[in-house]
Image (spheres, rainbow, N blue to C red):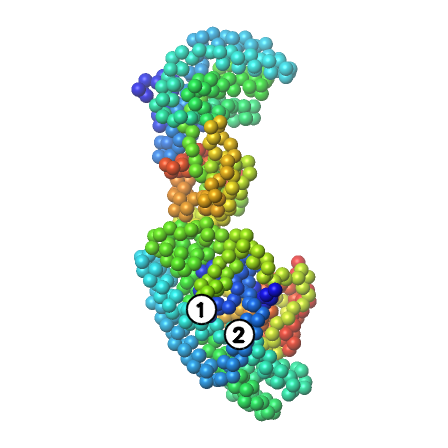
Amino acid sequence: MIENYKYIRFFGQISGKDAKTAGGKAANLARLVRAGIPVPNGFAILAPAFLELSKASNIGEKIEAVQSKIDAADAKSVKTGSEAIKRIIMAANLADLGIETLAAFAALGAKLVSVRSSATSEDSKSDSWAGQLETNLNVAKPDLIEKVKKSWASLYGERALQYAAEKKLDGKTNSVAVIVQAMIKPEVSGVCFTVHPVTNSKKQMVIESVWGLGESLVQGAVTPDRYLVSRPDLTILDVNANSQDKMIAKTARGSGWIKVPKSKRLAQKLSGFQIVELCRLCLKIEKLYKAPQDIEWARTSDGFCILQTRPITTFKN
Amino acid sequence: MDKYVLFTAADFPAFLAELAMFGGYGDLIFLHDRFSGGLYILADKEKKMAKTGLKLYASPKAVERLVKKGFNLSERVEKLTALYPESSFKNQTSAKLRLILFEYYKTNIPFLKIYSFTEGIYSSLIDATIRNFIFKSIKDKEQAARAFTALLNPSNQKTVAIEREEILHKTAAPQLIIDLCSSVRKMGSAKFILRSTVNKSYGFLTSLLKEISRRYCLSPAQCQACRRDEVIKILEGKTVDTAAINERVKFFAAFMKKNEPKFLTGPCGRKTIDRIKFIIPEKVTEFRGDPASAGRATGEVMVLPVILAKSGQGLLRAKIKKMKKGDILVANTTGPEMVMACRKAGGIVANEGGINSHAAIVSRELGIPGIVSTKIATQVLKDGDIIEVDADNGIVKIVEKTR
């Protein structure tokens, strides 16, 4: 029974006070779900779960003991400390929380999930955190608990520890929630800018799309299709379709480059009607956040879903 | 190896290329590419068409019949465009749009077949025949050039007619020359009306395709890259090969094969384009065309785009407004939509056309130098360049390139 979870909240349930303890990323996904935007289903293990675990077992004391010995000026000391704390966390017994997590995983009904940390403290915005928090893709049930622990351990990365030592922050400000989200199998992925990212024109939106996973787009390894759409009337102004012969796709061991089937190489990745459908969805998101958005999306056999949305940083009014 | 001649550097999207191929332009090869689009013709075929033109124009009666037929067909085309104002497309069902498109083809193809006889491709031999005779009979070159212009001026003004008779009398012109001149003038005045129908018809088609692209979530370029049967399929709710259409958006080479338009795209299309396309030399300082109206002028270039769709008229009007009196009008072709610009112009230089093209007729009527069939003028010249137009000899000299 979902209501009985102590520290787990599915995206649809996160609101109000949970939003803080679920971390920024999870709260963002929850906001999309509440607005009726399709996102891959998932749940958050709230931040207090880790704090409680630290108290209940003697993990917290052990970590503090290690942390107090760290010399922020000595890189080697920071490194040894970070590794020691990671070992402590990875050895912890999750007890009830582990049972809850596996139950929620079963309720999710996905074979593979992504496990990510979702920072809750204000510091999450500072550079000390950037790139430190964990993202694990294609996690199956046997590895789930280990990856959850790894996400917690990411709080004690070298840079984070150094920062905490310099600022003399105690362990309490460090808390992190964990997001467990169903992995999807996208046929097409891409990004959508709800205003033109180059000209800043508010009358145009731009979609880029590739076959398979969106990583190939981020890497710049393939030339995407580019669609230019006029808004708000959503008429298509330009379709620049480009052939694609390799794509990043799900494989037995996570993801990797494979060949695009011949029949698809020259094909337009999204049909005109799909382009307009996606634009509608993205405009809805823009309305929700009241600012132009840079949206990562994917299309599976079930339709479109939204992976991430953030404001367009270069946009000037 | 086959030799291809550039007919004009105009770039036609697939739908229009197909329409043109059915409508009397089936001997041309249509190249569509980012920078080197153009209409080409086999050199041998060009000669054959010139002979056909000479034979036709030698008979003023045949020309008169043709013009009459052209007027009838133009009326039918205009009736269709009047029946469905462009603003009405939005409210029509797709089934109705399909019928309108069928009707469009039915009226426009026979009309274009007649209209194509006014193209320069048919008139090159006529032009040369009249010119040779005049320059042989009148020794002074400048006078000969002026006489040539006067003979072909379709104006009804009495002074023009008197001058014409005097020249014919003075040179003791044979019947062939008299007939050819008369045919050119007849075709010339008809051309104004026929060309205005082409304008209306093209604007009508552009709006129709635009509505279809809006309704079926295609970009305007995609819709224009469709072939007729694909647009019909789209309107019937059937699926079409979007990948093939997208290929045609990028580039193609098209020509008639066994009475059916054939489009080459992909590597095969690229190879054909590279084989045929005319490469404009990098540093052109002068180029030639056919003299259409005698005289010389030097002035600043104003390149006007050929925009027949209503939605683009604002852009054209703005450019015409910017044009200064005495500027040289440079365009792919001129048309009724550019009349105000022609009045301001100190001279006209066009890519296309022969003695019976709009640019030729208008420059003769206005008494300004005119050169047609330069093929490359719009690609070589930019707004603000200073050029010297020597329409007695058909030479455009670039005096100063703007930066």
Q: Which residue is drawn at 56% across and 10% down?
A: A66
- CA distance for labels 2 and 1: 15 Å
Q: Is residue B345 visible?
A: no
Look at the numbered discs 2 and 1 and tell me whether their residues touch, using CB distance below 8 Å. Answer: no
Number of numbered discs on residues: 2
Say which of B235 and A181 sits in front: B235
Image quadrant in which you'd find residue A105: top left
Q: Specify the subunit that label 2 lies on.
A: B
Residue topped by disc 2: B49
Give the side of residue B141 with respect to residue B156, left or right.
right
Q: Is mark 2 on a helix, strand or loop?
A: helix
Q: Mark 1 points at which residue?
A: B23
Q: Which of B225 and A261 is in front in this view?
A: A261
Residue at the image position 53 percent from the left and 80 percent from the top = B54
Q: Which of B110 and B169 is in front in this view?
A: B110
What residue do we see at 61% from left, 90% from top?
B171
Q: Is B10 displayed left or right of A19 in the figure?
A: right
Q: Where in the figure is residue B62, as x and y percent of width and height?
A: 46, 82
Q: In this view, does B5 lie above or below B295?
A: above
Residue in the image at 53% along x and 10% along y: A64
Task: Say which amino acid is labelled 1.
Answer: Gly
Q: Point out residue A179 in the picture as x, y percentages from the top left corner.
A: 43, 24
Amino acid under label 2? Met
In front: label 2 or label 1: 2
The quadrant of the image that shows the N terminus of chain B is bottom right
* In-image side of B108 versus B252 (left or right): left
